[in-house]
Amino acid sequence: MKNRSLALILAALSTLGPFSIDTYFASFPELGNHFRVSEIQVQQTLSFYLIALAGMNLFHGALSDSYGRRRAILVSLGVYSGSALACVAAPSFYWLLFLRVIQGLAAGAGMIVSRAVIRDRFAGSDAQRMMAQVTVVSGLGPVIAPILGGWLHVWFGWRGPFAFLAAFGAVLWCTCWLGLKESLAPNAHQTLHPGHLLRSYAEAICHPAFVLLCLALAFGGGGFLLYVATAPDVVLNILGLSKTQFGWLFLPIVSGLILGAAVSARAAGRVHATRLLKYGFTLMAIGASANLAVNLCGIVRVPWAVLPLSLYTFGFSLLAPVATIQCLDIFPTRKGLASSIQGFFQTLIFALIAGVVARFVYRSGVKHAYGLLIMMCLSWLAYGGYAALTSPANDTVLDSEIASEKPDIPGSGIDQVGKI
C-alpha cells in the first residue's frame, strides 16, 4: 500500500507537465482574439514555457541533491500555482508570456525529482516496475487534460484552464506536504558549490554514453510529442474535428503509453532488459512506418489516421523505463543531476519541435508522419551509439541488479560511474 500511495503521488507530479501543455490547447483561437495576436504568436506561449522548462530542468535535480527531494518539490509547486493563478488576470499578451515562463521554471521539478525518488528507494527490477507503474497512472494526464481543457474553455473561456492549473498545483502541494517523505539519505546530500557543480555538469555532459542515452529518450519521445505540440493544428485543421474532440488524438497516443508501461512493469525481472529494448524499437519502427503509409494513402480521418500512433507509443513506453534507469545509474551518487540533464534534453527537443519544426509540418499529415519517422530513426541511432560504447564488456545495470536486488550505496562523488 505504501508503494501504491507513493506511485500515485509521483504520477500526479509527473502529470503537471502534460496538464500545463495540453489543458489550454482549445483556448488558442480565443487567446489570439482576446490579445489581438496571430496563431503563431499564441504558439509562443507554449514555446516560451518549454524553453524555461528545459533550462530549469538542469537545476531541479541538483537542488534536490542538495536540499532534499521533498523541499524542492514543495517550493516549485508553490511557485507554479501562484504563476498559474496570475495567468488568469494577465493584462496583456506579454504578461501572459512572462507568466508562462515562470510556470515553466517551476513545472519540471515534479517529473525530474520523482525519477530520483524512485531510484533512491528502489533498485533493479523493482525500480523498473515502479517507474513503469508511475508511467501507467500519469499516462491518464495527457488523455484527461485536453478533453477537460476543451470543456473548461466552453464553460469559462480561456481563463478556465489556467484557473484549473492553479487549483491542481495547490492540491498537489497539500498532498506532498502530507504524504511525501524525504527519500534522500542524510549522508547523500551534495554541495551546491559552483565549482563542484560545474565539474559535475561538465563530467556528465562530456560522458558520451550518457549523452547518447539522453538523446535516444529525447528523440524517441519527440516523435509523438510532435503531435502533442501541434495538437490544435492536427485536431482542428488536419482531422477536421471540434474543440471538444482532442481526445481522438490524445487517447491513442496515451493508451499506447499506458499499455506499454504496464507490460514493462509486468516484464520487470522476467524478461531480459535488452530484449525489451529490442521489442520497443521494433514496435516504434512499425508504428512510424504504418503512420506514414496511412497518410501517403490520404486516409486522414479517425480512427485510421491515429491508430499507428498507439503502436509507436506502446513501443516507446516499453523501453523507456529501462533506458531511464540505465541513464540515472551512470552517476549513482548524482541521480538528481542525471535526471535533470536527461529532462533537459527531452524538454529541449520538445521546445525545438514546438518552436521550429511545428511550422514546417503545419497543416500536413504527411509531413507530420515524416517527422515521426525521422525522430524514431534518430532515437535508434543514438541508442545504437550508446550500446556500441558500452557493449559487450558491460550489460545493463538492471539485469545485474535483478539477481541481487540491493539498492545503491552512496559513494563519494560523481566520478563513481555505474556499470551499464
Image (cartoon, rainbow, N blue to C red):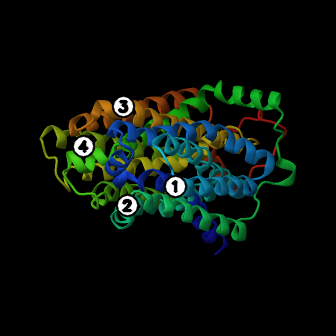
Q: In terms of secondary structure, where does tag 1 sit?
A: loop
User: Residue 171 falls in which quadrant of the image?
Assistant: bottom right
Quarter occupied by residue 249 = bottom left
Residue 23 image position (x, y, % from top left):
42, 57
Q: Residue reaching furthest right?
A: 187
Residue 291 got which mark?
4
Q: Amino acid at mark 1?
A: Ala
Kindly identify the amino acid type of the residue bearing the numbered disc 2: Gly
Q: Amino acid at mark 3?
A: Val
Foreground disc of the pair 2, 4: 2
* Residue 78 seen anywhere in this rendered image of the structure: yes
Q: CA distance from mark 3 to mark 2?
A: 29 Å
Point out the frontmost of discs 4 and 1.
1
**Residue 313 - label:** none
Spatial CA distance of label 3 from label 1 is 31 Å
Query: Mark 4: which amino acid?
Result: Asn
Q: Sequence-wise, which precedes: disc 2 or disc 1?
A: 1
Q: Which residue is mark 2?
A: 157
Q: Are marks 4 and 1 in contact (CB under 8 Å)?
A: no
Comes first in the chain, label 3 or label 4:
4
Mark sitting on residue 357: 3
Residue name at image x 32 percent, y 32 percent: 359
Mark 1 lies on residue: 89
**From mark 2 to mark 4, how far is it between C-alphas?**
34 Å
Q: Residue at x 44, y 36 (%)?
A: 219
Within 10 Å of disc 4 (Cα), the crowding (few <14, some 14-19, many 20+) is: many
